Each structure stands twice: as C-alpha cells, then as structure tokens.
Amino acid sequence: MSKSLEFFFDVGSPTTYLAWTQLPKIAAEAGATIIWRPMLLGGVFKATGNQSPVNIPAKARYMLQDLARYARRYGVPMTFNPHFPINTLTLMRGAAGYLDTPQFATYVTAIFNALWVEQKNLGKPEVVADALRAAGLDPAEFERLVNDDGVKERLKGITEEAIRRGAFGAPTFFIGEEMHFGQDRLDFVAEALRN
C-alpha cells in the first residue's frame, strides 16, 4: 500500500509557502504521494476562533524573523508580502478549480511565487491575471473556474472537512488520521511517513 500525505493549504499563508517548497522532497524520500487539499483559511479561522499571528503585534514581529530563518534554512527565496493579509477566496477557488488537472502545479507555483517571492498584490484581479498569463495560464479560464458553482462547493467541502478533522490553521498535514500543524513540524511529518 502506498503512503500518502494530505496537505491542507491556503496560498495566503507564508508558512504554507515554506512548507510547499519542502513537501515534494519529503514525499519523494518517503515514497509518498501528496494529496493536495486547498481550503479557505479564513473559513477555518472563523469556525475555530483562531486568527493569524500577524494580528498580535509581538507574535507578528517574531513571525517575520522566524519566516526569514526558515527560508534561509530551506534555501528558498522569500520576501514577506507588504499586502498581507489578502482575501484568498478567489485564489483558493482557483486552486480548487485546477485541482486534479495538468495545470494545478503551474497555478499553485505561479500564485505562491507571486505572493511570497515577487510581493504582488493578488488582491487585485488585474495583478492575478498578469501572474496567470506570465505562467502560461488563461485568465478567462481562471474566471470561469472561480465562478463555477461546483468549484465553489468543492472548496467549501474541503474546508469543512479540514475543520471536522481538527484543522485550525495552515498548513495542516494528515498521514492517515494523524494530524500535524505548521511548517515547523515538517520533521514530524517526515518521521511519520517513514514509520
């Protein structure tokens, strides 16, 4: 039986970006398959009473330092986005719309890089369209997807499932029913996959 790693994510989370840069290597080393689970972090926060650490000044200062430390450790580019936080509803509908298609990886890569490397304001539709075009994706197809009722329900359903299973933030990982939260717990994720 092959191992799988469920990755519940929202592109608007900087720690999720960091986890995303490391997961392919972790999964490959463990011979595991990543199951991509786009969820709406705002919905998770609302349902669980949680909030972004950036809303608490002392935590926000520390979080910015910690993100930079992890980016250096992982050897990945990261520049904190001055437009953070943005409403990711449309972006996450895009992830749900492209899920299980050949364009999914291209879409997620384009959005994560635009947010956490290029500091783009993806709260503006024209900036999203430019990022999509630069990645070879069709903004008109994106608009069709994010307005599709089935895509909206898919995102809502995955978000509700994450909450039912105990998620309270992003990134959240499941190996079977064992939950791990946060990109700073990737060593536990790798260990669980090995076992």
Image (cartoon, grey):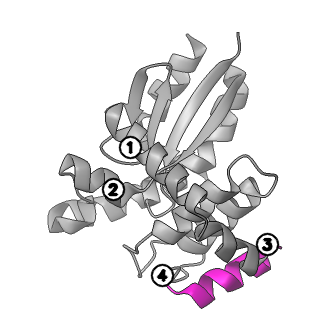
Q: Which circle, 1 or 4, is nearer the viewer?
A: 1
Real-space Cα separation, disc 2 to disc 4, in angstroms: 17 Å
- The disc at residue 107 is none
Residue at image mark 3: 137
Residue at image mark 2: 43
User: Which of the two labelled residues, at mark 1 and mark 2, occupies the earlier sequence position?
Assistant: 2
Q: Is residue 77 visible?
A: no
- The disc at residue 123 is 4
Report the magenta stretch's main SS: helix
At horizontal 17% and vertical 51% (from top left) the residue drawn is: 49
Q: Position of residue 54 (x, y in %)?
A: 26, 66
Q: Is residue 89 visible?
A: yes
Q: Is residue 11 above or below residue 39?
A: below
- The disc at residue 160 is 1
**Label 1 with label 3: CB-CB less than 8 Å:** no
Q: Is residue 131 magenta?
A: yes
At horizontal 35% and vertical 64% (from top left) the residue drawn is: 64
Real-space Cα separation, disc 1 to disc 4, in angstroms: 24 Å
Q: Which circle, 2 or 4, is nearer the viewer?
A: 2
Label 3 is placed on what type of residue? Answer: Leu
Q: Is residue 134 left or right of residue 74?
A: right
Q: Nearer the viewer, residue 71 or 171?
A: 171
